[in-house]
Amino acid sequence: PAWGPRRAERTAGAPTGGAVGRSPGVQARAVRELLAGAFRMPADEDPQEDGATLDAPAGEGGPAAAGARRADPDEVRGPDGLSPGGAGSGGDASAEPSLPAPALSMAAPSRDGELRRTFAALPPPDAGTFARTWWGNAWVTALEEGALDAKRLARGRSYAEQGHVDAITVTPGLVLAYVQGSRPRPYRVQVRLRTLEDDDWRRFLDAAVERPGHIAALLDKELPHTLADCGVPLLPGPRDLDPHCSCPDRGHPCKHAAALCYQTARLLDADPFVLLLLRGRGERELLDALSRLNAARAARAAQEREPAQLPGVRAADAVLAEGRLPALPPPLPVPAHPGQPPVYPAAPGGPDPFALDQLATDAAARAHALLSTGRDPVAELTLWQDAVRVAAARPGSGLTAATRSLYASLAAASGRTPAELARAVAAWRQGGPEGLAVLEEPWDPPAGRFDRARPLLLAADLPAFRPWHNHLTHPRGHVQLRLGRDGLWYAYESEPGHDDWWPRGTPDLDPVGALTGLGAPNDL
């Protein structure tokens, strides 16, 4: 035909290696490789690990799969020592290697809520220990007893120790994370755990409110043995953990899922509410339910108690007495201590139960003091002193969320900062109003006790303290004594050279005795 010579001429004149100059077999193979790489899923882009085989021929997959790899001792090697898909196995060795895929992450804290918690990637564990609590060790035991290959567990443990596990997201019945393997693209790993039914949660809540110590332990991030043994399967068994990974390995679990399980044990170790979230309930929902059940239980107990008969006079008898009223009954004896206020449940749109409890407890204590002594110990306090007193009555040192909220509100109401309030609370706990005055009010004591303090310190093999007003400061600037107007010595400590003094120890009439407990004489 007429087009035959022209086609042959164009083919003969085309540059070598061009698309037109390829033979039909080479062109078909190039098209096949292009299409195979275009529709390949992420899990298929990485060769098989841990000795598993691939169904695709060694030459398929193209240079993109071969160039995106890193060396790994678990890779499948061909008889010639080359990885499948590389040069010598049917691939195009002249093609440029593709760039590694960008690292993925499950971290999305903005999406967190009551039923979703995201934890940043954890640092390497201390001494390779993934669990220190009994419930964290129970999780690790369930993982290791349910594993089918000890070598995969050892590799997963090594991955976790080396920080290959990215941010971890926990939702009901599911733990998710990306785990970096030996390939540039990390693997998406899930560990599934069955959630509890409503009947299981009812049994758990009933067991939790049965003993007051259970609720206190949960608030302290602890899981009591008696609560875990209440008949509800909180902790997983050897076959309860269901791992899934996007890697081609079908081991149970693969090393990536094992690494995620080991890191999850550390999350459970620090906060047992992570385990409860895995089983289907969030922390706030559980605490609200426990508060309501505890209040209902206390109300039922109060109704069941027989009310005591109080002395009195019937109104009818008093009216019919024709002006002759009987004598009033004697007042009831003052109780030995203030009563405990009831538990106030949380309700949407209602007052803060913590604030109500704080207010009721403080009012009961003031009323008891007024009945016992005839005076109100709070009536003469300033707004700042009263704020310090209320904060000091709260157990702890401002580390919990409830205490931090209390400190912030009290500091704002009194025009101070939470840091100033925390220091004042330490002084109040050391010596009450006098301790607060020693912290905030320097004064010039008269000659006598203050002048005799320095020789007493020298006699106790201590160096000469520097005087300033009512302060005596160690030459190294890390220990200080302050004389209060009540005649007691108050000890303070600071980092050397920082002038950041905090109350320490117990006040004492003897300056040497006030330093007891701050360190050995050589340290002072």
Image (tube, rainbow, N blue to C red):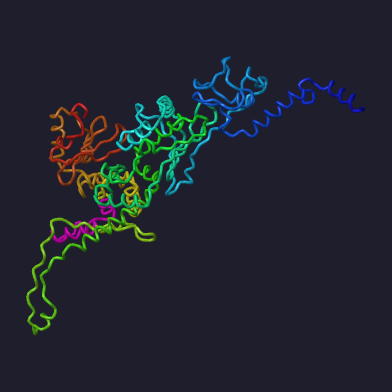
Prevailing SS of the magenta stretch = helix
Residue 70: name its quadrant.
top right
Image x and y of residue 425, in percent: 26, 46
Image x and y of residue 125, in percent: 37, 30
- Taking the spot 13% from the left edge, 59% from the top edge, the residue there is 335
Q: Residue 374 colored magenta?
A: yes
- Taking the spot 26% from the left edge, 33% from the top edge, the residue there is 478
User: Furthest residue to the front?
Assistant: 55
Above or below residue 310? Residue 190 is: above
Image x and y of residue 127, in percent: 34, 26
Apparent side of residue 521 relative to residue 396 in the rendered image (left or right): left
Residue 492: name its quadrant.
top left
- Taking the spot 21% from the left edge, 61% from the top edge, the residue there is 302
Please state, as top left, top right, bottom left or bottom right, where the N terminus lies in the image: top right
Please state, as top left, top right, bottom left or bottom right, where the C terminus lies in the image: top left
Q: Which residues are magenta?
A: 361-390
